[in-house]
Image (spheres, helix red, strand yellow):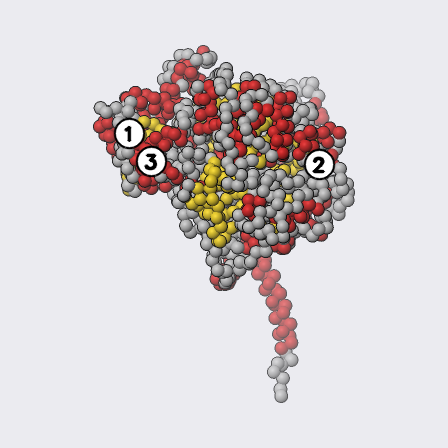
Amino acid sequence: MAQIFDRSSNALARMSLILTGLIVIALGLTADELQRSPWVTRQGQRADQPVPFSHKHHVEGLGLQCQYCHTSVEKSSYAGIPPTKTCMNCHAQIWTDAQLLEPVRHSWATGESIAWTRVHDLPDYVFFNHEIHVNKGIGCSSCHGRVDEMPIMYMQNTLQMEWCLNCHRNPGKNLRPTSEIYNMAWTGASELKPVWCAAEDVAAGSPTAGGVTCTETAPGGEVQMAAVSAPVTGVHAQLAGTGIGSEDTGVMHLPAGLHYTKFTSQAALGLFLVQHYDIRNPRELTSCEVCHR
Amino acid sequence: MKKSQGTGHRVQGAGAVAAGAEAPSILGSDAARLKSCPDTKPESEIGVLTMAAPVSGDGLVQIEAKKPVTLAEVRAKLAHQKGKKFWRSVDELAETPEFAEMVAKEFPSQASEWIDPVSRRSFLKVMGASMALAGLAGCTKQPDEPIMPYVSAPEDLILGKPVYFASAFPFASGAVPVLVKSDSYRPIKVDGNPEHPYVKGGSDPLTQATLLDLYDPDRSQHVLYRGDARSWPAFLAAFRSMLADKKPSGGQGLYFLSATVTSPTLAAQWQQAQKNYPQAKFVQYEPVNRDSHYTAGKQAFGSFVDAQYRLDQADVIVSLDADFLGGATFPGFHKLARDYAQKRKLEGTQEMNRLYVVESVATTTGFKAEHRLAVKPSEVAAFAQALAGAVGAGSAGGYSWPDHETKFLQGVAADLKASAGKCVVIPGEFAAPEVHLAALAINQALGNVGKAVVYTDPVNPMASLQTADLQALVSDMNAGRVDWLVILNSNPVYATPADLDFESALNKVGTVVHLGSHVDETGEIAHWHINNAHYLEMWSDARAYDGTVSIVQPMIDPMYGGHSAHEIVQSLLDEPDVSAYDAVRGTWKDQLSKGDFPPHQANSGLAGGPGFEFNWRKALHDGWIDGTAYTLKTLTAKGGAGAASAPGGGDAIEVAFRPDSNVYDGRYANVGWMQEIPRPVTNLSWDNAAQMSYATLEKFGLAENDAVEITVGGKKIIAGALAIPGQAEGVVVVTLGQGRRSGRVAGGVGYNAYLIQQSAAPWAQTGASLGKTGDIYDICVTKSHHIDQRSVKAGGDGSGTHSIEGNESLDRGIIRYATLEEFKSNPEFAHEGEGRDVPEPDETMFPAYRYDKNAWGMSIDLNSCVGCNACVAACYAENNIPVVGRQQVKIGRLMQWIRIDTYFEGDLAAPRAHFQPMTCHHCENAPCEQVCPVGATVHSPEGLNLMIYNRCVGTRYCSNNCPYKVRRFNFLLYSDYETESLKLMRNPDVSVRSRGVMEKCSYCSQRIQEVKIAADKENRDIRDGEIRTACQQSCPTDAIIFGNINDKDSRVAKIKTQERTYGVLADINTRPRTTYVAGVLNINEELARDLGEYSS
């Protein structure tokens, strides 16, 4: 009786074994990618909103400050979505007949909320707190992106856990002076855009942010260069001697007598701010209970 | 039946071997009980589950024949024990095979089996289909979530930040001043007001439960007329037209029946109304009333007075059937418990108080006592009289006591006399007036009045003898004299003594109006039903037990547009439309116009005058009105102790009635937390039982769990028999508040004890009869849960009993205590004995963690814990703990994160008990962390043992490996995701757990994070005492202390350096962060010698 399988079947069998392995790997990789893809995370997707509200128009065009609407961002875990009243502050006067704003007027007239679709939607088991981030030098755009350039709001980042941990493991790379929190165009310190910062000792019990002064224009007085590898701990020690008399050269908004350090890289600035803003160390920041309760 | 020798009376020494071999079996077993529970919803009104034939089929378990144990066997086993011996249930003590089998399993029987209404087969079918979708389900995207912002936001609201408002929970035994946590103007937590001058924080289970009561989905939501929805104006029109008709006759035929009036404003409104309608009558009746107390006060002083006991000034406390540590039912509970515990802290002193309790019902107060005597209800008065005689405050009476009682009596009397002026005798609310008279006389004779006892006006503005008033009302109703009956916040159809037959009397009333929070038994048959506003929804006022007035302010708009008694009574006045708000302001106008106010307020032109507006706001903000505490009365009791009636005959069975410690008189029966939390001493959950001693069980040929028929005055109820260690013999205790007809939670739970209550003697009845029905009543008790199976290998006494918590609690030092003398001579007593040393930190494979900054720890003072359950209820509210229901509780799936373990010690008839709150110990070397395969339970840099719900896959290895048995698993979807009103109640800072997830105490991690963020923002360290866990906050005795143990100046770190601090099971190197402070008992050495107690 002839053999059922030809000798060439051996090659096929081997190939199919290998293929099966490859398919399993490919499926795994696909699932992995899928989980991170905008299809799941909704990164970059524009949700249907009752009113096509343009942050670009209101922030970049009109220059509204973030907190005009998101009032509780410095005070509470929740940044706040403006009540209809906030819209009507202006739109009772301008664009009173615009068709686009009909839902706003309807809400105002009937007392029913405008039902927005949440764009930045964390799972219910994640407890994010805006106030501590904003008070410790994380700017709006670090997470939300260039909101001032978004005609329709979308999510810039995945808001997945690995993205959160990226920063919690090394917060320095995203820290900025608290004076720049609402600056959408902030890009961090670099050779081209150096940042000068000075720190003074603050009494315990007063916010750390008050003790750090930063500027993007060269201040007068003595400036010490900080390199990436410079031991930043030294800065604080130097500043203890407050008697250093540096003449005020006319930069009026800056307190006199401060000892500025020039930062030409975000790493150095981050290191400086981590220390002076009293940021918890990565071990504490990555502990589960920080976000999960 | 042969009466067994020696079991007929009282205390047996540990060595007393009693009954003969033919003694009938008395003990059902927990194991058997756990097996015999198919769906347990009782069908009939009185809640009997007639035992069906064994059910077979998927998911249900055959009911096995029991192998009961005899009392003789138990006693025999006890006799061989040397030294201290702790036990938690009699099955454990008796070492029954069922018990052994039960502890050999991780969870009590059936816990790992699928016993849902869904059968295993249909489950597999469903799962087969879902498996196909499972891969996709993992990738399911989150659904879109809407944001509904305000249209116009309240000015001061910061979303995400809770606001706290002061108010008061009006309760008949004195208002509990509260601080309500409000999130977006939704009350989400009720706690004691820590700044209140009298109560000083702390709460109790009932106060905690009022939150769920507010959000109860069964609350009535409409005004009803004969069952149809009507509007409030329609009722007002009908009511006022009736009033207009009755005005000429002075209100003839108009009657009010109200729960105890707690509001001075309501009292003032009624007094005004009485002038307009002199013939109208206002009757107060509440099942738990102060008739005994007031009767005695009237007799001794000629007027109603309240007695305040100042335990901070008492070295010797004698309770005559007074459960003053049991809960808010006892007037002034919070202050009493705090002062009692304060004198037992032994911080910087070696002085402590001593408590003697004579009681007819086993209570936590009794088990906290140094010396306890169980007597029948009818003997309490005779004992009180004899005590009065012995201390020279009256004649001793002619009752001759057995030897044991005589010794006890003489010991107590000698101690009282020795500490005259620094002692106090507290009579029980449910004891006869003679007991109160005796207590008055003793306190007066010993010079305690003005020191440890002071008298004031009654806390309730319209004090009355309620039972007599109710009897008069019922006879008026039967005589047809009642035309309109307006029932305010009361449920008399359910909660009145059966002999009055209130329901048939109600049929003779023209029109019945019922104001109530639920359409309850009364609401169903009333013509008009008005939905009541909850105290968190309305304006009112109330007095704490010392008289300090608190304004009750609304936290939320009435959810269902409810109305209050203020509005109804106001209709009788000349200005019928004055709101409750204006009425309350009117009451306190004079009081609040006095005193200082800032000058800038003087010209503010506010409505009520400058000083008033300022002081009104201050009173609302602070939670009380300054200077409203009662002035103390100087009174001298007339007439002495008086003669007590002779105790009932020797063998007659007596029935004692008590309000349930959780559902009270029935008004909280529909609150899931209260049904579920096991009651102190009895460990009953979702049930009430006929509680009696083991000897009484035996005497009537009963086994635990048997259905018994209790007959009083021709009326019968059927209840399940439950043996209670230490219960006085010949007494059956029944608890009120269960057996409700309606309510998704309350309906059909337990039996209704009101059906055998008699108005002549509502709290105790002699001449009851007890009969065995032959059926099994499937009681729900939790006492044998949480038992560790590994102890068979872990050691023990080698007897083969397998419970660490019970049998080994001495060997393993779970409970450690000493007498005061032992403590003085050997302060290190808590650390002596084998296996009590904590191993060196290096004796482990696992490297030690380092804790740089904060290291959270807890200390629980076993001397202060009175087992009141406030912490348990507070934990339910704070941590969104689900209610699982009766059936799930029976198979050991209770979800409470903190439980109170009760360890009995010594003889069955007269045991001592130790209460131990048990919750996650946050071990530094945690067994659970080492076995979790998915890293769902991990260690934090501050030493918290974290539970990450979204990582948990439900292997339950952690629970298996936890020596403290404090982990709880969501076997089913216990959290209610559907009911709208319950969503409003949830703490937004804590995840609501779904099915298949393990959970446990987190040391209130959300509170730690909140404070850490606040401290970080302000660039400072966390202050000691800034973080308070929910259990700590609710504890009326300050038994629980939480803080940073790395900070050597923190309170918890200091306590942990005390000699008495010990860790439970610390010898297995778990390094628990929760430690206990060992108890010290200030025993009367002489009396102990006489009675043969404490001789180990």
- Which three-letter amino acid code belongs to the residue tagged 2? Ser
The local secondary structure at tag 2 comes to: loop
Which residue was labeled with disc 2? B1095
Find residue B100 and report its horizontal and vertical position in percent: 64, 53
Q: Residue at x 59, y 24 (%)?
A: B390
Which is more foreground, mark 2 or mark 3? 2
Residue B363 or residue B402, whichever sits in front: B402
**Does residue B608 sit above or below B874 in this rendering?**
above
Q: Residues within 10 Å of mark 3 (few under 14, many from 20)?
A: many
Describe the element under mark 3 as helix, strand or loop.
strand
Callout 2 and callout 1 share a chain: yes
Which chain is indicated by disc 2? Answer: B
Q: Residues within 10 Å of mark 1 (few under 14, many from 20)?
A: many
Task: Give the CA distance from mark 2 to mark 3.
Answer: 58 Å
Amino acid type at mark 1 = Leu
In which quadrant will I find the C terminus of chain B?
Answer: top right
Q: CA distance from mark 3 to mark 1?
A: 14 Å
Q: Position of residue B406 (x, y in %)?
A: 61, 31
The x, y position of residue B823, in whole percent, is 72, 30
Q: Residue A232: image x %, image y %? A: 70, 32
Chain letter behind tag 1? B
